[in-house]
Amino acid sequence: AVVSTQSTGMCSKTTLFVFLVFLSVEGAARVKRYSAVPIHLCRAPQYYNCAQTLDCIHSQYRCDGTIDCPLFADDEADCGAWPCPEGAVKCSTTGQCIPQSLVCNGCEDCPAGDDERNCTSHYQGCRGNQFYCHLADTCIPVARTCDGAPDCACQNCTQTEDEDCLKHDHVDIYLSEDEPLYNLTVNLTGYQQDARIRAQDWTVHSDQVVYLRPTVVSLGEARCGPSTVWIYEGDQEAAILCGDTFPPWRRGYIASQPGSSFRIHFKYFKDLDDEQEDMFKGFSLTVWQLPE
């Protein structure tokens, strides 16, 4: 097995790759996940017996987002109906359990990011997925910025803040057998812009399965939003990147359907410049296809 740990800012994620070999257990904390009880006593509700092995784990490590069963990763499968232990909450799409302390901490710990929704933002009382209208002293959804319809309405306003946008040209990325990999990097460190919002879109084209992996995400210290990268497959939202978090995708990447494209939509809000001038701001993604 190969363990890869990625860390930026306050958030870190460990991705575990299993190649049908026995898991190498490193450190006392890892060993504590396994029980030494005889295999005939390894049963619910206290324990879970990994499929077709003699590995027995404590029940609290079932559906916790970390693979402990080395052959089939069955401790992280079929989690929808698995009850979370006290002090934990369930992710909506996978059913995995995360500690209550990770909810609204600015890092997306659920794959769909539902642990960071409807959270109070650190900025002007708006939620992380909202934009603050300074002149109107109100909050609007981030999705309603740069859409051609002013929403930051107020008396005697001379400008519409939510439409104060710098829109970059759309970029098409074509993967092929000759050029199967592309690294997309947006580095905003020290970047100065007059507009309050910068927006840009990329579309990744291929007639094969497209794989996408984030390598750097630094769009705010620990806060999730408002600066955000949305990733769509067709018209469906596939992932969101924000704050300083790596999404806990089980394989460390997401994959499209064959012949389907990924659209990457990015909005960067000037408000981040008020936090730390010398902090790295930006993100990097790698997209690729496998040889035929």
Image: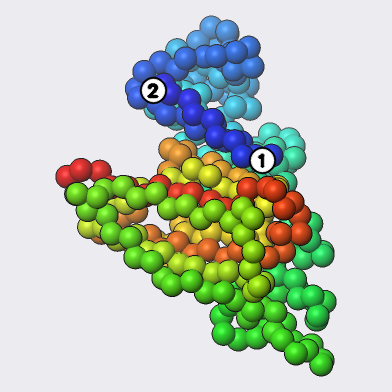
The Cα atoms of the two marked residues, 1 and 2, are separated by 33 Å
Mark 1 residue element: loop
Quarter that holds the C terminus: top left
Q: In this view, does 86 lie above or below 41?
A: below
Tell whether label 2 touches label 1 (CB within 8 Å): no
Residue 81 % position (x, y): 55, 42
Q: Nearer the viewer, residue 287 or 106?
A: 287
Residue 249 is left or right of residue 87, and the answer is left
Q: Nearer the viewer, residue 100 or 224?
A: 224
Residue 153 seen in the figure: yes
> Which residue position is annotated with label 2?
71
> Which residue position is annotated with label 1?
9
Task: Please name the residue shown 72% across and 82% down the image.
Answer: 152
> Could you classify mark 2 by the number of other residues whose Cα lies within 10 Å: few (under 14), some (14-19), or many (20 or more)?
some
Q: In this view, does 267 lie above or below 256?
A: below
Q: Which of marks 1 and 2 is nearer the N terminus?
A: 1
Quarter that holds the N terminus: top left
Task: Please name the residue shown 40% across and 15% down the image.
Answer: 22
Residue 239 is left or right of residue 21, and the answer is right
From the viewer's perspective, is the residue at label 1 or at label 2 nearer? Answer: 1
**Amino acid carrying mark 2 in the image:** Leu
Residue 92 seen in the figure: no
Task: Please name the residue shown 49% across and 43% down the image.
Answer: 215
Task: Please name the residue shown 38% across and 66% down the image.
Answer: 171
Q: Nearer the viewer, residue 216 or 223?
A: 216
Answer with the quarter of the image where residue 134 lies: bottom right
Answer with the quarter of the image where residue 5 lies: top right
Q: Which of 189 and 101 is in front in this view?
A: 189
